Every structure is written in structure tokens, then in C-alpha cells.
């Protein structure tokens, strides 16, 4: 898939939003990618996952034993990546504020894992999920996401393969441009606290 085809998928799903948004990182932005909308169509989710799977080098794919994604945003794309790669897919969640495996999910000692996200901005959730995999005895050997909003600057400590990079300005709450500050902020992501 070309970048234009990927963006067309987001636009057709009405998943590229304009306004004032508080991201899960706490930063504010005038644009928001609602990956849940682009993934709600199974055929579209499958196409995007297949394209993302092609970004991961074979030398990494051959070593993988599982796909892990953070809940909530990564659950659907993680599942589709598991399907695309022929691997079990599971997720970590935060019942008490820290990512952990639940629902009978677990890893074999030393199991090689692909971490899958929907959108990466600062990498905070990804790094937290990597720690959960390590605490469970696994080893994340690569990470991927549908969208890299970091402008290629995020460092997850492992090779990172986004389907598309998208430069979208993000600002701390105390440094908003006037035009953004004039719009009420909404928090459309999966973390409840603004």
C-alpha cells in the first residue's frame, strides 16, 4: 500500500479528525487519528494489517512466537497482525494502572514478541507494554504501528516499523497556540483522565 492509499483508508472511514484533542500522552493536537474507526471494518483492518506485516523484515518474523498489543487501542490491529503473521495475538491491560497480562494470556519464558500499536506519539504506552512483556518472561524483538506520529523520533529500544508516518504537531497544555486554545478540548482516546 502506498501512503496515499493508506490515508485514503483513514479518510473513507472518517478516522482523521480536526479540532482540539488531548492525546493519551497528555499532549494537545489539532488533528486526531481515530484508529478504532479505520479498524471497525474487518476487511479494511485486514488490508492494513497485511500491509503492515510486509514492513517487518523476514529475519524478525521468523523468530516471533506471539503478537502483543496494549489495550485498548492496539487490540484490533494486534489481532489482525496475529492473523496476518499466523501467530497468537494477546493484549495487556491496566486494571490497576500498570499494564499486565490477564484473561489467561501469558508467554513462554524467552518467547519472542512483536508489540503492535495503533498510533505511537511519544512511545509511553509502548514502553509500558514492553515492560509488561518482560515481566511476563517474554522478549519484545520489534514493534510496529499503523501510524507513527513521532516524526520518526520515537525510540522504543527495539526496531520499530510503522505503516505510515504522519507529522501532526502536538503541544504541552501550557504551550498551546492561540487558535488551538480557543477550541474546547476533548479526549477521544482510551485513557479516561484528561
Image (spheres, grey):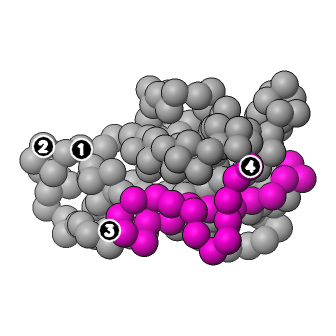
* Magenta span of residues: 85-108
Characterize the local packing of mark 1: few (<14), some (14-19) or many (20 or more) Cα atoms within 10 angstroms. some
Characterize the local packing of mark 4: few (<14), some (14-19) or many (20 or more) Cα atoms within 10 angstroms. few
Q: How many marks?
A: 4
Q: Is mark 1 on a helix, strand or loop?
A: strand
176 lies left or right of 55 = left
**Is the residue under label 4 in contact with that under label 3 (CB below 8 Å)?**
no
Characterize the local packing of mark 2: few (<14), some (14-19) or many (20 or more) Cα atoms within 10 angstroms. few
- Residue 175 in view, yes or no: yes
Name which quarter of the figure residue 91 lies in.
bottom right
Q: Earlier in the sequence, mark 2 or mark 4?
A: 4
**Is the residue under label 2 in contact with that under label 1 (CB below 8 Å)?**
yes
Percent of width and height locating residue 44? 77, 64
Residue at coordinates 50% horizontally, 32% vertically from top-left?
156
Given residues 88 and 33, the one toward you in this image is 88
Name which quarter of the figure residue 163 lies in.
top right
Q: Is the magenta stretch mostly helix, strand or loop?
A: loop
Residue that badge 4 annotates: 108
Residue that badge 3 annotates: 187
Residue at coordinates 52% horizontally, 27% vertically from top-left?
157
Amino acid at each position: 500500500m502506498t501512503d496515499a492509499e493508506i490515508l485514503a483508508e483513514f479518510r473513507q472511514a472518517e478516522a482523521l479528525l480536526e479540532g482540539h484533542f488531548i492525546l493519551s500522552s497528555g499532549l494537545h493536537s489539532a488533528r486526531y487519528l481515530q484508529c478504532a474507526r479505520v479498524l471497525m471494518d474487518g476487511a479494511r483492518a485486514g488490508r492494513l494489517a497485511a500491509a503492515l506485516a510486509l514492513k517487518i523484515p523476514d529475519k524478525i518474523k521468523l523468530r516471533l512466537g506471539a503478537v502483543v498489543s496494549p489495550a485498548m487501542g492496539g487490540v484490533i490491529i494486534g489481532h489482525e497482525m496475529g492473523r496476518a503473521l499466523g501467530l497468537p495475538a494477546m493484549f495487556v491491560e491496566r486494571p490497576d494502572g500498570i499494564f499486565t497480562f490477564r484473561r489467561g494470556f501469558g508467554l513462554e519464558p524467552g518467547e519472542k514478541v512483536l508489540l503492535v500499536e495503533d498510533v505511537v506519539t511519544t512511545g509511553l504506552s509502548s514502553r509500558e507494554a514492553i515492560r509488561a512483556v518482560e515481566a511476563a518472561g517474554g522478549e519484545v524483538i520489534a514493534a510496529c504501528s499503523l501510524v507513527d506520529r513521532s516524526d520518526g523520533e520515537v525510540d522504543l529500544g527495539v526496531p520499530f516499523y510503522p505503516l505510515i508516518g504522519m507529522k501532526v504537531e502536538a503541544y504541552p497544555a501550557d504551550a498551546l497556540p492561540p487558535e488551538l486554545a480557543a477550541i474546547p478540548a476533548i479526549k477521544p482516546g482510551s485513557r479516561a483522565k484528561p
